[in-house]
Image (spheres, helix red, strand yellow):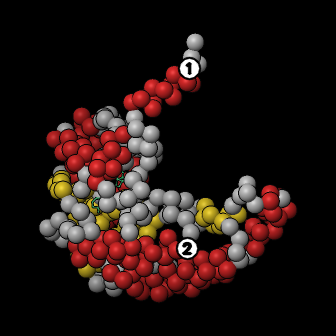
Amino acid sequence: MPKLKEMTEKLTTQTKPPDSQAAPADWRDRKAWDRYLHANYHQPPFPVPTEVGAPGWQAVRFLDLVLARGGRVWFPGCGTDIAPRFYSSIGCNVVATDFSTVALRAQRTFAASPPERLFTNWSAFVQQRKPDSGSFDIAEQDFTTAAPNGVFDVVLNCRAFQGLSINAKRAAAKRFFAALRPGGVAIIDTMNVQGSSARNEIEDSLAEAGFYLPYNATERWYREQLDGTGISFAMLLGRPRVQYNRNNSVKNSMAQWERDQSILDSFTEEYEARRVQEQSLVQEAANKPDTLVAYVIYPTG
Ligand SMILES: C[S@@+](CC[C@H](N)C(=O)[O-])C[C@H]1O[C@@H](n2cnc3c(N)ncnc32)[C@H](O)[C@@H]1O
């Protein structure tokens, strides 16, 4: 008699292609995005995404900023995320774009459904927070070559930037910059971006397009110091943590780990002082009415 684990594994491999849950290796591959989005799609209804962990909650972390900036928001690479529809349900003027047909189909389904059908606790939610009415437009677009008509207060790119080629990053950053009003904001919410070169590449593409990146000078300085130690680390909650590496016998000793960690930690004080020093420059730049600011978020730190 086959064991339950074997039966479950068999069922899962039969119903889904093996790699369908992973993002495509080649981000230009629309069909691969279709398969990925299809494999990861969840049917509504969902809890209102202000609840941490509910589908869409990651993008809803930026709701207050979007509302404060004026509420006109473009979601390039929206996927099947419910967040764009939620933003429109509470008064934002939203345009969601993607080049995947699965993404567009999902967004059109959300657009056609009233929020009380999409969100299980909508009636309780609206009693606390009387929503204004917004708008919701959807378009099939490659955001490296096209942008929706109109002018936006915020571009909210969630988990749809880090895997682009360097040229595609540059092209996308230019599109985002051109779509924003003076004083507008781009948020690039990334996923699993570790290592200086990957982070620098994202930030450089945005800076080259004309965006101002707050605290970038300090962050670059910090990365350079940490890289200069030669210690293998990952960033966690904004701080470097020594990476254990099974293949590296030196790193297997706790004493060595502690020594390495204390070397990495030795830069913290100066890093914090530099951030305080950069603060007045950041405020000055961000307060200029014409500055377009880009925030790159590394959720792991
Ligand atoms: C990892 S998914 C993230 C989806 C959604 N933003 C979220 O956070 O759930 C990346 C999305 O970006 C889309 N995408 C990637 N490159 C794109 C491009 N050049 N133009 C338009 N959409 C793109 C994919 O089709 C996919 O829907």
Q: Nearer the viewer, residue 113 or 254?
A: 254
Looking at the image, tell me whether mark 2 or mark 1 is earlier in sequence order: 1
- Quadrant where the C terminus is found in the figure: bottom right
Dividing the image into four quarters, tell me where ligand 1 lies.
bottom left
Q: Quadrant of residue 212?
A: bottom left
The residue where tag 1 is placed is 4
Tell me if I can see residue 169 in this picture. Answer: yes
The residue where tag 2 is placed is 196
Residue visible at 40% across and 38% down in the picture: 17
Is the residue 69 above or below the residue 222 in the image? above
Relative to 39, 279 lies left or right? right
Tell me if I can see residue 67 in this picture. Answer: no
Instruction: State the separation of the CA atoms marked 2 and 1.
Output: 44 Å
* SS category of the residue bearing label 1: helix
Q: Quadrant of residue 53?
A: top left
Mark 2 or 1: the one toward you: 1
Q: Nearer the viewer, residue 57 or 189?
A: 189
Residue 108, given in percent of the width and then of the height, sits at 18, 45
